[in-house]
Amino acid sequence: MNKLLMPLLVVAVMLQALPASAQVKIGFVNSQRVLNEAPQAAKAKKKLEKEFEKRDQELQKMAKQMQALQESLEKNSSTLSESDRHNKEREFGELNRDFQRKQREFREDLNLRQNDEMAAIFERVNKVIKGIAETEKYDIIFQEAVWASPRIDLTDKVVKALGDSAAGAK
């Protein structure tokens, strides 16, 4: 069954089971907006940039080195001896393989660290949402929806609470 339809089905069943006089308090949080606006996400991004800055600069240096070697090879290929041209081509091939390996490792390591940071942020976001739900007595809060009315949107409250907790952690 579709991932988006299942929560709606659950809500429909819940609503039918309640007496007509009971009111269900429903909320919605836009997770993507929370990630874009939460101070913890910006802090994690800066942390990762700093952590991977040196490796990124090394890759950029290697790319420039490869480009210079390729330009030199193209420019001087007619004047180089067969063995010199062959040596430069082999050097370029080795440098290219090393570059691609380091680039792949860089992306894998960066993705792992981003996932770690995002997991920590989502854990904090979920705690904040749960706190709001308990304090304000919500019956259910959705984080995924095709559409939600602005009157049930709690995203601003969540972002503010995350900002307050980030300011308190300093």
Image (cartoon, helix red, strand yellow):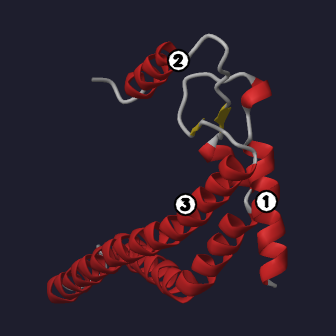
Rendered image quadrant of residue 79: bottom left
Cα distance in 3D space between marks 1 and 3: 14 Å
Residue at position x 75%, y 66% in the image: 39
Q: Identify the residue under disc 2.
A: 15
Q: Nearer the viewer, residue 165 or 138?
A: 138
Cα distance in 3D space between marks 2 and 3: 29 Å
Q: Identify the residue under disc 1.
A: 161
Q: Quadrant of the C terminus?
A: bottom right
Judged from the image, the secondary structure of the residue bearing numbered disc 3 is helix
Q: Please state which amino acid type lies under the numbered disc 2.
A: Leu
- Circle on res. 122: 3
- Circle on res. 52: none
- Assess disc 2: are there few (<14), some (14-19) or many (≥20) residues with their C-alpha within 10 Å of its C-alpha: some
Relative to 156, say whether 40 is above or below.
Answer: below
Residue at position x 42%, y 72% in the image: 71
Judged from the image, the secondary structure of the residue bearing numbered disc 1 is helix
Q: Please state which amino acid type lies under the numbered disc 3.
A: Phe
- Assess disc 3: are there few (<14), some (14-19) or many (≥20) residues with their C-alpha within 10 Å of its C-alpha: some
Relative to 89, say whether 39 is above or below.
Answer: above
Cα distance in 3D space between marks 2 and 1: 29 Å
Relative to 103, say whether 13 is above or below.
Answer: above
Rendered image quadrant of residue 139: top right
Q: Please state which amino acid type lies under the numbered disc 1.
A: Ala
